[in-house]
Image (tube, rainbow, N blue to C red):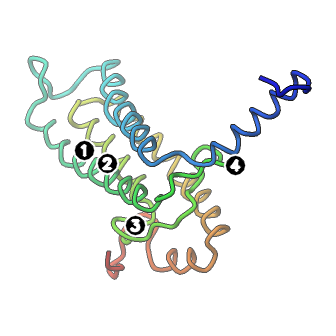
Amino acid sequence: MSCPGCRPSCAGRRSRSSLESAVRSIPRWLGVLGWAALFSVVYAAAPIRLSRFGRRYGWASGKPGPVNLVGLIPLGAGAATVLWTTALHYQEGEEGWSVTGKRLGQPPDYLVTRGPYAYTRNPMHLGSAAIWLGWSVVLGSPIVAVIVAIAGAGAAPLVPAWEERELERRFGDEWRAYRDEVSRWVPRARTRPT
């Protein structure tokens, strides 16, 4: 709609401008729903579906064997880690998660250094890898195992390095102190308390 006396093209500019100003952040509850949907697809539906493209080792009568059930350990630990880190992000983003000027995968506007982040700078990546590794064992699926290996080999050196450059740019000395104290992947013998 245009205002009285304005050209029709005015309405497009006005509504686009008001939309841009209205969409500065995603409400926390919507972020949680988005994470729940993403979690279901990425961490459950995708590995199960991909495993159907090949043979399932260790399975009998359509059920996982005892060795396959060992995969529940990394799957459960990974899921707990991803959910814990998501809960921490929920707590930190009190005003919602900013989306203004953000690119996909860009780090948030706050620095989380507690919980699993007190032991490793990338608990969400490690949790994700543990979930997929767990699924590869539970499902007895070489296809899922290969995907874990390829994704890990590709993402491990690239994604954290990019995220960390962005975090250093945003948080400066606070980030550098955290980086110097907490390992990127494997927790050090001396870690920060949560």
The reply to whether discs 2 and 1 touch (Cβ–Cβ < 8 Å) is yes
Disc 3 designates what residue? 117
Cα separation between marks 3 and 1: 19 Å
Disc 1 designates what residue? 75
Determine the residue positioned at 36% across, 70% down: 119
Cα separation between marks 4 and 1: 34 Å
Cα separation between marks 4 and 3: 26 Å
Q: Amino acid at mark 2?
A: Ala
SS at mark 2? helix
Q: Is residue 132 left or right of residue 89?
A: left
Cα separation between marks 2 and 4: 32 Å
Cα separation between marks 2 and 1: 6 Å
Q: Amino acid at mark 1?
A: Leu
* Earlier residue among tags 4 and 1: 1
Disc 2 designates what residue? 130
State which mark lies toward you, 3 or 1. 3
State which mark lies toward you, 2 or 3. 3
* Earlier residue among tags 3 and 1: 1
Determine the residue positioned at 60% across, 51% down: 106
Q: Amino acid at mark 3?
A: Tyr
SS at mark 1? helix
Disc 4 designates what residue? 101
SS at mark 4? loop
Determine the residue positioned at 27% across, 36% down: 135
Cα separation between marks 2 and 3: 16 Å
Within 10 Å of the Cα at label 1, are there few (<14), some (14-19), or many (20+) other Cα atoms? many
Q: Amino acid at mark 4?
A: Gly
Determine the residue positioned at 45% across, 66% down: 112
List x then y, in percent, for residue 104.
Answer: 60, 43
